[in-house]
Amino acid sequence: MEGKETVGVWLVGARGTISSAVICGLELLKRGAIAKTGLFTETLVGVSHNFVEYSEIVVGGCDLIESDTRSGVRSLVQQNILPWQHAELLSTIEWKADDNIVTLDKRCFSNGSFNKTLQHTISLIRGHIAHFKATYRLDRVIVVDCSSTSPVFTFTEIAAGLSTWSQLDDYFSNSFDDVSHSLLYAASAFNEGCAYINFTPNVASEIPALKELAVIKGIPHAGKDGKTGETLVKSVLAPLFLHRNLEVMSWQGYNMLGNADGKSLSDPRAKESKISSKSQSLTSILPHDDKLHANVSIDYVPSLGDWKVAWDFVHFKGFFDTAMSMDFTWRGCDTALAAPLVIDLVRLVDLDWRKGKDGVLKHLAAFFKSPTDFSCHDFHQQMQYLHNYLRSY
């Protein structure tokens, strides 16, 4: 890689299935062993740009669980996500990812256990990222948060009143409160001079104080909550009813998933975060008042593993107020849908960073359920905005 710039990707939740798929996918892409299906940056719109090459990306990260990369590969094979022949190829590769993934003590996020402030946890995370960057002499590091959904903490309300970074920094320096882990990862990233991508529905870089810090540091960021399944379909279908002036009376969605994220959603407080994120697309696209019933429910079904099933029922009116309906079932593998989005986002954010962009990258809205500072949830319009943005380069 001599003479080329290298980019580090620091995965939060690095031992989860999405991160494992990102690590495996990058290794296989470097060797031309898999098709580039699912990667926007490999489309006609994308290939004309000078995106970072897969061979120039180095992966590291952190997690709260002990495991190893090979366990992640085995899990992907067992769940029929990764074909066994690719696993065999990966077994012949010298893995460096394990050396670059650190296990964080869970007590760091329950700060009363150590009698340490939140600033101590941020310093700890920053130290790990700095070591990773120095070890591989990386030109840039992008932190990608793929951790599980966290509960909505009281801090969400506190954060609304902390409009500047100095206020938030003072809070971190004196507080022992439980907060969204993603908030601490975002603060760590910006203070360490790293870009940040929030692939979770957790409170993070979208709060005013951290948006200010990103601009001060000249750092780009994007989020939140990767859009991979049912919400993606909704954001494509809902405009159909709008543009044909068909009145949607009810749109009921029911989701079942069995991975670690599904397990975390067994906590009603975490489920509240996810449902809030998933519900925004419909109410922002469709004309709505008290008559529109738009509801989403989520259940954890362990036997599904990393596979997700969503059933949606749409009840609508046409001419003469004739009531009609449609329903669809989405059966998808969350990991196989999410991993290429993470890789795309890394390449897109890095491109913008090299071109001097900072702050919220609003043109990446199409990748998220709750895009920061972008009110349009119509997927077609979001993609047009992205295409126009890229053509302007």
Image (spheres, rainbow, N blue to C red):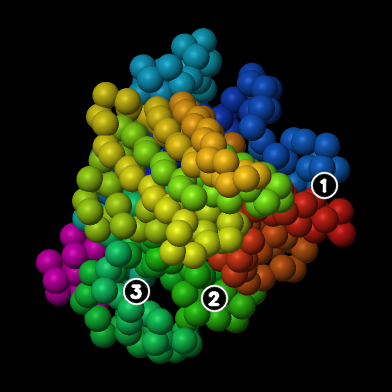
Note whether 343 is above or below 193 in the view shown. above
Q: Which residue is mark 1?
A: 49
Q: Is residue 254 left or right of residue 334?
A: left
Q: Amino acid at mark 3?
A: Thr
Quarter of the picture holding the N terminus: top right
Query: Answer yes or no: do the residues labelled 3 and 1 have beta carbons within 8 Å?
Result: no
Residue pictured at 48% horizontal, 81% vertical:
209
Left or right: where 211 falls relative to 177: right
First in sequence, mark 3 or 1: give its number: 1
Q: Is residue 180 above or below residue 171?
A: above
Q: Residue at x 64, y 32 (%)?
A: 38
Q: Amino acid type of disc 2?
A: Lys
Figure check: 53 above or below 107: above
Residue under the point 32% across and 43% down: 298
Amino acid type of the residue that numbered disc 1 sits on in the rendered structure = His
Q: Measure the alpha-carbon separation of dots 2 and 1.
A: 27 Å
Q: Is residue 128 visible?
A: no
**Residue underneath mark 3:** 156
Mark 3 and mark 2 lie on one chain; the one further toward the N terminus is: 3
18 lies left or right of 25: left
Query: What residue would you read off at disc 2?
Result: 211
